[in-house]
Amino acid sequence: MTFQPGTTNVEPPEPPEPRNRNQEPLELGTRNSEPETVPLPLLSIIIVSYNSRPDLEGCLESLTAAPPAIDHEIVIVDNASTDGTQEYLRRRWPGMRLIEAGSNIGFAGANNVGIRQTFGALVLLLNPDTIVPPGALDRLVAVLDRSPQVGIVGPRIVDGQGRAELSFGAMMAPLAELRQKVLVRGNDRGIAFIRAIVDTMTRCEREVDWVSGACLLIRRGDLEDVGLLDEQFFMYTEDVDLCARVRARGRRVLFTPHAEIVHLRGRSVATARASTQAAYRRSHVAFYEKHHPRWAPVLKLYLRLRGR
C-alpha cells in the first residue's frame, strides 16, 4: 500500500538540522555527491512502558517480525521502570529508540514526550501489552487515509483468546458509563448474551465518541491542534478526553473492525493494582470536573460513601 501524505491535511515538521559535537551544521553525503535528504517516517509508533518488560518483548517482536509496510519509527518512552526494562531494551533491541523519562510522569505525560520527539504525519499510541498481527497497522492507516474528515481511528481489539473487547463508546457521562460498565463487566465475566452483543457491536465500522488509547491512530495535525494529551490525567480517561477535544473541532472519531489488535490487558498493572485504582479515581474525578462540572460533586460524594 502506498500512503499519500497529502490526505492527512498536515505536512511533517522540518527535522532538526544535523550537527556535530561542536554544534556546527553537519553536511550529509560525500564531497562528490549532492547532499542527502533525511527521509521522515510517515508513522510514529509511541509505546509508553512502566514495569512492563515481559509484555513489551511480545509487542516489539510482533512489530519487527512483520513490520508495517508504511515508513515508520518505533519509540519507547520508559517511565523509570524498576524491572530492568531499560537494560533489556539496550541489550535486546540496540537499534530501537529509547527515551528515558527519568521518573514516572504518567501515561499522558510520557506519550507527549514521545510525540514531541517524533516527526511522523501520523501518530500511533500503542500499549506495551499488545500484539500487532501482520498488516494490521497498514489496514488501520488505510482507513484513516480514505477519510480526510476523520482525525482519529481505533481498531477492533481482542484478548488473548480472540474475544472482542468493547474498546469504544459514547462520551463519558453517568448513564453512558453505567451502560459501558454493564457491557464490559458482563463480557469479562463470560455472560453469553452480553458477549454476543459486544462481538456484534465490534463487527461494524462506526463513528463513535471515543476509542481506546491501547491502540489509537491520530493525525499529527489534529493532535497538535488540541495541544496533545492533557497531562492532568495521569492514567486513564486521557483517551476519552483527547477524542472529545478532537470532536469539538469538528473532526470525527472512527472505530473500524478492518484492523484487529490483540490486547493482553495490563499484566504490569496487576502488580500495582491499588495504585492504579487510585490513579483511575483521580482521573475520573478530573474528567468530570473538566467535562461535567455539575456532576463532579455527585461523583465525589459517591466515591466517599464507598470509602474510595
Image (cartoon, helix red, strand yellow):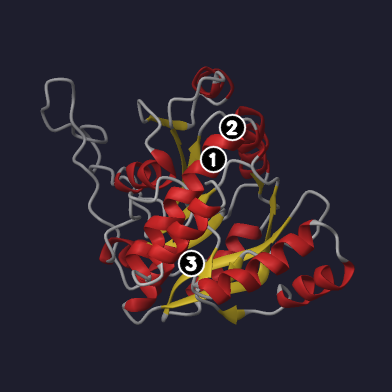
Task: Give the left or right position of residue 146, taking residue 161 as reference.
Answer: left
As drawn, which residue projects farthest toward the right?
Answer: 192
Kindly report which numbered mark, 3 or 1, lies closer to the viewer in this rendering: 1
Quadrant in the picture for residue 298: bottom left
* Residue at (41, 51) in percent of width and height: 41
Judged from the image, the secondary structure of the residue bearing numbered disc 3 is loop
User: Disc number at residue 272?
Assistant: 2
In the image, 114 versus 161, the foreground residue is 161
* Structural distance between the alpha carbons of marks 2 and 1: 6 Å
Q: Can residue 23 be seen?
A: yes
- From the top left corner, tell me how far across and down residue 77 is, in percent: 43, 36
The amino acid pointed to by label 3 is Phe
Judged from the image, the secondary structure of the residue bearing numbered disc 2 is loop
Residue designated by label 1: 276
Report the quarter where the N terminus lies: bottom right
Residue designated by label 3: 3
- From the top left corner, tell me how far across and down residue 156 is, in percent: 67, 65
Judged from the image, the secondary structure of the residue bearing numbered disc 1 is helix
Task: Give the left or right position of residue 247, taking residue 224 as reference.
Answer: right
Vertical placement of 74 versus 268: above or below? below
| Pointer 3 or 1: first along the chain | 3
The amino acid pointed to by label 1 is Thr
In the image, 294 versus 261, the foreground residue is 294
* Residue at (57, 36) in percent of width and height: 274
The amino acid pointed to by label 2 is Ala
- From the top left corner, tell me how far across and down residue 101 is, in percent: 36, 30
- From the top left corner, tell me how far across and down residue 306 is, in percent: 57, 51
Q: Can residue 72 be seen?
A: no
- Would you call the spot at circle 2 few (<14 residues within 10 Å), some (14-19), or many (20 or more)? few
- Would you call the spot at circle 3 few (<14 residues within 10 Å), some (14-19), or many (20 or more)? some
